[in-house]
Amino acid sequence: MRLLKNRLVPLAVVTAGVLAAGCSDVNNTIDRAQACLEAPKIMTELVADIANLTNDPQAMDKAIDDAASKLNGVADTASNTTLKEASDQLATTLTGITVNDVNDTVDAAQKVGTEATAYAQKVAQACGGGG
């Protein structure tokens, strides 16, 4: 009986290690899936908001800053390197957009649209099997 007990202890330790490693993989998969869902949603909402805010520069500027903040959150939780880098880069780009007056809203809307398209391609690559 003592021999059986001596063998079970190391087996239990190894099993716990394997399960812990497996849980880590599952958590990374969940983080990636959540980031892959959240990232395009942020940009879709921003593009829709921008279309409705062309006459309100202050609100547009805030919407862009809010989206940048959310993208930073995605980047912080993304376990996928491509998605993390793309989110970080877009957040930085969005933060650099300043909307002071109605004339700026046109330029900002174009810039956000262009950046959103490029970002969508990177997200598709990262979430569709690359990264």
Image (cartoon, helix red, strand yellow):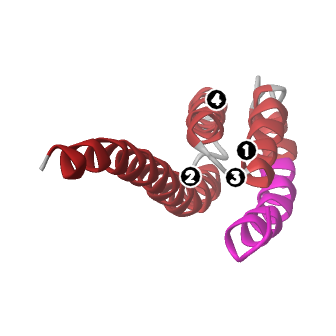
Alpha carbon distance from label 4 to label 1: 18 Å
Q: Amino acid at mark 2?
A: Ile
According to the picture, the residue beneath numbered tag 4 turns out to be: 65
Magenta part, dominant SS: helix
Whether residue 75 is in magenta: the answer is: no
According to the picture, the residue beneath numbered tag 1 turns out to be: 84
Q: Are marks 3 and 1 in contact (CB under 8 Å)?
A: yes
> For the point 70% across and 76% down, which residue is it?
128
**Viewer-side label of 4, 1:** 1
Q: Which disc number belongs to residue 64?
A: none
Could you say whether the residue bearing mark 2 is in a helix, strand or loop? helix
Tell me where residue 56 appears, x and y as whole percent.
60, 36
Alpha carbon distance from label 2 to label 4: 12 Å
The quadrant in which residue 95 appears is top right
Residue 106 left/right relative to 124:
right
Q: Are marks 3 and 2 in contact (CB under 8 Å)?
A: no
Q: Residues within 10 Å of mark 3 (few under 14, many from 20)?
A: many
| Total numbered badges shown on the rendered structure | 4
Boundaries of the magenta span: 109-131
Tell me where residue 27 appears, x and y as whole percent.
45, 51
**Viewer-side label of 4, 3:** 3
> For the point 31% across and 49% down, which residue is it?
7
Alpha carbon distance from label 2 to label 1: 14 Å
Q: Residues within 10 Å of mark 2 (few under 14, many from 20)?
A: some
* Identity of the residue furthest to the bottom in this view: 128
